[in-house]
Image (cartoon, grey):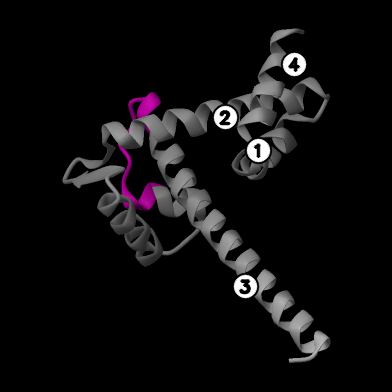
Amino acid sequence: MGSSEHADTDTRKRLRRAHRLIRGQHREERTEDYVESIYRRSRKNEATRIVDLQKVFAVSHVTVIRALDKLEGAGFLRRTTKGITLTAKGKRLGEECYERHETVESFLLSLGVPKEIAESDAEGIEHHLSPQTLEAIRNHLGSR
């Protein structure tokens, strides 16, 4: 194998690894988004039904059911005739996601970002912060 072919192989391997990493991150984001949404409703003592999640995520009934099947299989939630409830594992993740979202949103608001934009931006940013960056934001907000 020549050096050009070797470089092409290395590039393809790197791209495959990056693609797998991104797909994994997207799966985690979906899990966090669903669990956080259910958690937010439970904080307001609101039941969560499939139709509620359809509205939140603007997806089909089937898409929500598939997501819930995976989340239930992973131990994050239970479905009953009364609605969807989080398990202890789901509540921990929901609380963590909620707190992270609120921290990022508060940080953006402290920078002067309008509320509607801060809410939307926080939804994307929250999934990609390292624990160190999140802690730095908390420290920054605490020192104000």
Left or right: where 71 falls relative to 16: left
Which disc, if any, is residue 100? 2
Residue at 44 percent of width and 40 percent of height: 37
Measure how far apart labels 1 and 3 are at the Cα level: 23 Å
Residue 39 in percent (x, y) is at: 40, 33
Residue at 42 percent of width and 64 percent of height: 60
Of circles 1 and 3, the one toward us is 3
Left or right: where 89 falls relative to 137: left
Which sits earlier in the primary sequence, circle 1 or circle 3? 3
Q: Are marks 4 and 3 in contact (CB under 8 Å)?
A: no
As helix, strand or loop, the secondary structure at mark 1 comes to loop
Measure how far apart labels 4 and 3 are at the Cα level: 37 Å
Magenta residues?
40-52
Q: Residues within 10 Å of mark 2 (few under 14, many from 20)?
A: many
Q: Are marks 2 and 1 in contact (CB under 8 Å)?
A: yes
Q: Which residue is mark 1?
A: 129
Residue 125 in percent (x, y) is at: 67, 41
Measure how far apart labels 3 and 2 are at the Cα level: 30 Å
Q: How many marks?
A: 4
Q: Judge by depth and name the residue closer to the eye, 69 or 89.
A: 89
Of circles 3 and 2, the one toward us is 3
**Amino acid identity at mark 4:** His
